[in-house]
Amino acid sequence: MNIQIRPILVALRRHKAGTLLIALQIALTLAIVCNALFIIRQRLANLSEPSGVDESSVFVIRNQWAADWPTAQVDTQVKADMLALRQLPAVRDATPASGYPLKGGGWDNYISMTPDQTKPTTDAAVYTGDEHFIDTLGAKLIVGRNFRPEEVMVMGTQQAITPPVVIVTKALADKLFPGGNALGKSFYAMGTTPSTIIGIVDPLQRQGVDRWANAYAGQALIWPIRAAFSGGLFYVVRAKPGQLAEAMREAPKALIAQSHMRIIDPKDGVLDYATIRHMVYDSDRGMAILMGIICVVLLAITAAGIVGLTSFWVGQRRRQIGVRRALGAKKRDILAYFLTENFLISTAGVALGAVLAIAFNLWTKTRFEMSQMSMTYVGVGVIVLLLLGQGAVLAPALRASRVSPVEATRSV
Amino acid sequence: MFGYYLDLAWRSLKRTPILTSLMVLAIGLGIGACITTLTVLHLLSGDPIPGKSAQLFYPQVMPDTRSKTEPEIGFTYTDATNLLREHRADRQAIVVSNNIKVFGPQAGARPMSLSTVATTTDFFPMFDVPFRYGAGWTPTEDGNRARVAVISQELNDKLFGGGNSIGRNIRLDKWDFRIVGVLQHWQPQPRYYDLYGHGAFASGDSVFIPFSTSRDLADLGIEGNALDCWEQLTDQVHLENQPCLWLQYWVELDTPAKVSAYRDYLVSYSEQQKALGRFQFNGKPLTGLHDLMDWLGYLQVVPSDVRLQTWVAFGFLLVCLINTVGLLLAKFLRRSGEIGVRRALGASRRAVFAQMLTEAALVGVAGGMLGLLLALTGLWAVRRSPTDYAALAHLDLRMFLVTFALSIAASLVAGLLPAWRACQIPPALQLKSH
């Protein structure tokens, strides 16, 4: 098969507008599709980030008090509640908490290495829980030990307490002690007394996925504190394997039976981790779906546009095609002509498109906190669009190849 | 003539149903995507208090002694009350809010957890808050730490059946407050006056009480959601002397001269505080004074995803337009013969041009209708999403009109090149070749 490029280029010069339009459309499609794929990939990566929680069996109860109790009475009630929860047949373990990974409340503390440091070293999410916290969440203690019951302190709403022992995430340990071996070392978390690291868990996400905290990703500390807040607190509960639904039904009933002086919101007072993950990452998932739809629709429209314009060209050139056929060109020569023509236009389009794609990425990097797009996306996009072009042109090109040599003698 | 062109356009479009539907689909999809994202963007970036927003300013100072590069968003108690006392703006108000327990007048009722704003007397005139009954409290009541409250129309409907409840009591946590004002429905979006630590599109506030009273009854716990302290606290309830940022401070400045005077004042205030040993900085102090719309931009009230989506949607529309240009070009030039005949029979170039543009516009109208349907579907999807602005996503009349204007404009732009090419067709040549 002998494909000659020159005649194709000469012919294209007579269709400047159409050629330019197709090339431009391919370029823009490539630019948008590459970036959309990149966004999708980033968002999906967020979605699948492990929280460190045994998500298939953990749920959270937001427990508010309907009475005004002093700290001591709240603590008595919390202890009674824990006893009631842990006795349920479907429940493996439970802990009171001021916050929980991915979504739940709580606060952050600045971390310093010395008490008089003016600029803090970093920032960590603070979790509070008793000696059941690690087991309830299903977090993996990679080194060190868990809290002992006698280490757990009680903290009322208006108190600031710095326990002498702390369990930290690996991310925080690595940040504070880059040389490793953080176990046994201590730091200050906005207190006058230090906390000594007795254990390290990995992984455990922070209590929120807000963008401001990206610099502190995975940095959290757990203090042995039984929160006795007068407003209310979270109860994190881990069901026995396969008994999540039953535990979620029984737990609120058991709490109400323990004491009815509480408010558990019937709508979102009890949330399992599937729901929590769904809520937290909803915007990421929505964005990924939206970009996916845009990619598909855009590719379809571009393909349709190529089909439309090439069909028009084929219709316009029926006589020339007939002449070529009459002069001895085979069907596959005609087919090759149109495929090559499209390939030339597409190549010009993707070349421009690759530049646009990178430019768009650089621009979103400055304005939308995006990161550098890998060239793989551009490569994949280029291949997809070249194949799309060849696929789209196939039908009109086949039709062209079936033009009979007799057409050469007809006027239209 | 227009009627005739319309008739010709309709016939021409009917002759090529697939090509026509492809063009309508392309325009419709592009318009639908753009209108959906534009509506959300417009809604989120709209001026919550038009006509007044240019006079409302959020000042910033920097009491935090950690090394930072930007002035703070929150205020300490000391700074907020200093600025309030020195009274250098036309109006000024401290704002802080939390959900607290509210009891109705009926004995034994269960408490509701309602958003309660602690603020100062200027809040109501400054933000043009409309009253149904009564009015805001007086500066004297601010000074006396009076237990007075202004409640929302919605809370008044719920507790008092919408009647005039001035002089009646509501109980906040353990304390009774006398109602002095009931608002007309007031729920600006974004909830611009209280963004520190709160979602921008939260639903409205139910109760307003004097800030001084909220400090008097510190156990109410109205201390915002973003208590940011740079040292350990010695007292978690009485935040007055604690190293914490937790308040917001707004000023109204009616003339540009007052704005620049206030800027100078913030600098001299910072220098004075440095002399007192409270602030630490080298050289010029970091201060800020943003007007309301600037402030919303500074806090990135419009989520960056929404802005990114809008850009992508317009890129999408651009591809759809280029696609339509190509298809119209093919369609018009395919009718070279017909156009040649019309030109030979005396139609001017302008007439051919107008005829072709009419056809393009007709595609635009159809595309606009499809786009409208798609935008309604898109907004329905946004409303079902759990974002805090979901409930607001409705197409208003303006965006409805914008849809058609944008669609017709887009199709006319797309039709320009093809129509120009079509009217260049020489009559004689076409007739000869047929």
Image (cartoon, rainbow, N blue to C red):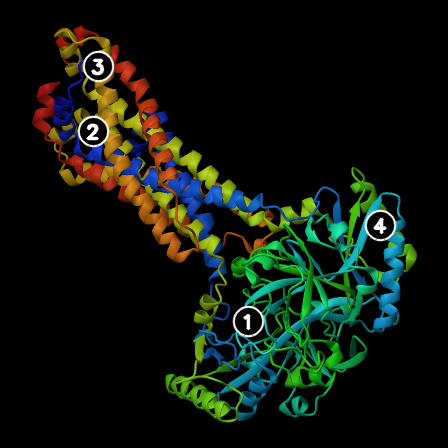
Percent of width and height locating residue B269: 47, 90
Q: Nearer the viewer, residue B60 or A161?
A: A161
Q: Are marks 4 and 3 on the same chain?
A: yes
Q: In whole angstroms, how far apart are the C-alphas of marks 3 and 1?
A: 73 Å
Q: In whole angstroms, how far apart are the C-alphas of marks 4 and 3?
A: 75 Å
Percent of width and height locating residue B317: 36, 43
Q: Are marks 2 and 3 on the same chain?
A: no
In the rendered image, the vertical position of residue B127 relative to residue B424, given as above or below: below
Q: Nearer the viewer, residue A273 or B103?
A: A273
Location of mark 2 (residue): B333
Going from N to C along the chain, the mark reached first, 3 or 1, is 1
Residues under numbered marks 4 and 3 in contact, where contact means CB atoms less than 8 Å apart: no
Q: Residues within 10 Å of mark 3 (few under 14, many from 20)?
A: many
Q: Nearer the viewer, residue B434 or A65?
A: A65
Select label 2 or label 3 by which is in front.
Answer: 3
- Amino acid type at circle 1 is Pro
Location of mark 1 (residue): A120
Q: Are marks 3 and 1 on the same chain?
A: yes
Q: Quadrant of the C terminus of chain A?
A: top left
Subunit that carries the residue with mark 3: A
Q: In whole angstroms, how far apart are the C-alphas of marks 2 and 4?
A: 74 Å
Q: Residues within 10 Å of mark 4 (few under 14, many from 20)?
A: many
- Amino acid type at circle 4 is Ala
Q: Are marks 1 and 4 on the same chain?
A: yes
Residues under numbered marks 3 and 1 in contact, where contact means CB atoms less than 8 Å apart: no
Q: Residues within 10 Å of mark 2 (few under 14, many from 20)?
A: many
Q: In whole angstroms, how far apart are the C-alphas of marks 2 and 3?
A: 23 Å
Q: In whole angstroms, how far apart are the C-alphas of marks 1 and 4?
A: 41 Å
Query: Which residue is at a point 53% across and 44% down the rendered structure image?
Result: A45
Subunit that carries the residue with mark 4: A
Select label 3 or label 1 by which is in front.
Answer: 1
**Marker count (numbered):** 4
